[in-house]
């Protein structure tokens, strides 16, 4: 069946990186029996300029209809002074919540060719391949009550609420178990069950769901230890699952292990497996329009789309191998450059991936 992919390039380097990712999808359509149709719409600052809204109704309607969304990046100084709801970033946040994208997948993958880019020793990180599954629409970022107020004694106080229902925990746990099953079959659930009631419920529900996945080896770790272990010996992990707040912090630690923000893809999935796929980095306005941005995070986001929404793990592997070959050839954008390698532009890197796929 033909799948619909909506491309939302956005701002800054967004159009440049999406152009290369689209070339990859077109090559797969042409040469590898992929069957996707591509459509495009405006989002972020580009949409503010065009119609005064960072998520126009027409874009949202197309996003609802699509099977998968390829998202570039949004934001830039030009729009920073607008009220919050008109800022480009609000377009992305609204899109995530309108589409119910509750499962955020952030792989931290380090191609051995780039081990020098990490601030950690090469033997600690070379070949790193972790998947962090973060709950994205619940927990302390959304729990009620939330307020800043003054108590009867005139003291200022503020409150946020960390709240999870068993249903919310169960659905993210199922996503994580399914992913662990497709990877190396090991899942570590991260919580703070020694202190927090919400974490005890998290642990109980994850254990209950685990009974349906006897083939997946489940372990639990407190979040403070997980932060330490990620830096001490990150290769002990395969798939991690955790709540919104802990996942926010741990996924940034994991990203930094790789040292190359231009290489990191991500996915946000709904209950039916529909997904929004985007690089972890932002719109990089400092290098936009120069043809030097690294397109590989976006190309690897296409690989995630193939694996998690389009059911084409075989093609996902082809794309990932093609990226590996491009690195083997010594082609590098400036962000992942070391001494003896050849500086390549955005289009050259994208073209090299496409050549490999053909
Ligand atoms: P950024 O990720 O855009 O850039 C940080 C630094 O990394 C910059 O020096 C940039 O040139 C470099 N960089 C990033 N991606 C690169 C790539 N693929 N290749 C080479 N170099 C790369 O973060 P920032 O500068 O803090 O934010 C810029 C804008 O992006 C802001 O408006 C911010 O709000 C927005 N932003 C958007 C998203 C998103 O759309 N999902 C995420 C983060 C930031």
Image: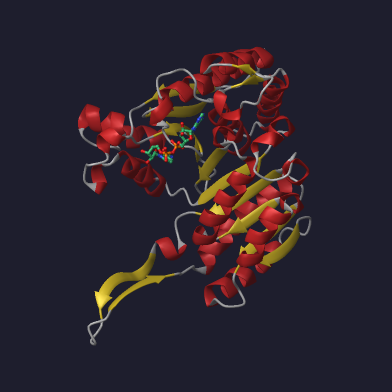
Residue 194, compared with residue 332, is above or below; it is below
Residue at the image position 78 percent from the left and 43 percent from the top: 123
227 vs 140, nearest the viewer? 227
Q: In the depicted view, which residue is nearer to us: 324 or 211? A: 324
Residue 33 at what x, y percent from top left?
Answer: 64, 18
Residue 18 lies, with reference to residue 280, above or below; the image says above
> Is residue 202 visible to the viewer in this orientation of the structure?
yes
Residue for point 59% across, 45% down: 256
Tell me: 110 left or right of 22.
right
Image coordinates for residue 132, horizontal then vertical, percent: 61, 50
Q: Say above or below: 57 vs 33.
A: below
Residue 56 visible at all: no
Looking at the image, the residue that sits furthest to the bottom is 153
Image quarter of residue 207: bottom right
Q: Quadrant of the C terminus?
A: top right
Residue 302 occupies quadrant: top right
Locate residue 64, reporting x and y percent: 39, 38
Ligand 1 sits in which quadrant? top left
**239 or 159, nearer to the observer:** 159
User: Residue 157: horizontal and vertical position, in percent?
Assistant: 31, 76
For image coordinates 43% across by 29% down, the residue present is 6
Image: 57 above or below 323? below
Looking at the rendering, in which quadrant would you find the N terminus? top right
């Amino acid at each position: 069946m033909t799948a619909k992919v909506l491309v939302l390039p956005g701002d800054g380097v967004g159009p440049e990186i999406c152009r290369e990712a689209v070339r990859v999808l077109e090559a797969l359509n042409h040469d590898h029996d992929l069957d996707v149709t591509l459509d495009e719409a405006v989002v972020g600052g580009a949409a503010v300029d065009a119609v005064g809204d960072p998520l126009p109704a027409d874009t949202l309607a197309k996003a609802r209809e699509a099977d998968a969304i390829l998202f570039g990046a949004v934001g830039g100084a030009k729009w920073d002074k607008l009220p919050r709801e008109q800022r480009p970033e609000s377009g992305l946040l609204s899109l995530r919540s309108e589409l119910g994208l509750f499962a955020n997948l952030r792989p931290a993958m380090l191609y051995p060719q780039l081990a020098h880019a990490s601030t950690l020793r090469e033997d600690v990180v070379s070949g790193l391949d972790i998947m962090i599954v973060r709950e994205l629409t619940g927990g302390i970022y959304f729990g009620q009550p939330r307020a800043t107020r003054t108590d009867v004694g005139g003291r200022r106080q503020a409150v946020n609420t960390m709240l999870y229902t068993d249903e919310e925990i169960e659905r993210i746990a199922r996503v994580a178990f399914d992913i662990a099953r497709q990877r190396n079959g090991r899942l570590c659930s991260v919580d703070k069950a020694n202190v927090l009631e919400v974490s005890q419920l998290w642990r109980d529900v994850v254990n209950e769901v685990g009974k349906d996945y006897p083939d997946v080896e489940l372990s639990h770790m407190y979040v403070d230890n997980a932060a330490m272990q990620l830096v001490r010996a990150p290769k002990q992990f395969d798939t991690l699952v955790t709540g919104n707040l802990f996942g926010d912090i741990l996924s940034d630690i994991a990203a930094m292990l790789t040292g190359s923000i231009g290489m990191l893809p991500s996915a946000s999935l709904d209950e039916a497996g529909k997904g929004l796929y985007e690089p972890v980095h932002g719109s990089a306005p400092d290098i936009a329009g120069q043809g030097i941005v690294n397109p590989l995070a976006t190309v690897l986001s296409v690989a995630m789309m193939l694996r998690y929404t389009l059911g084409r793990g075989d093609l996902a592997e082809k794309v990932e191998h093609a990226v590996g070959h491009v690195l083997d050839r010594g082609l590098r954008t400036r962000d992942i450059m070391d001494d003896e390698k050849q500086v390549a532009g955005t289009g050259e890197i994208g073209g090299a991936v496409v050549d490999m796929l053909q």
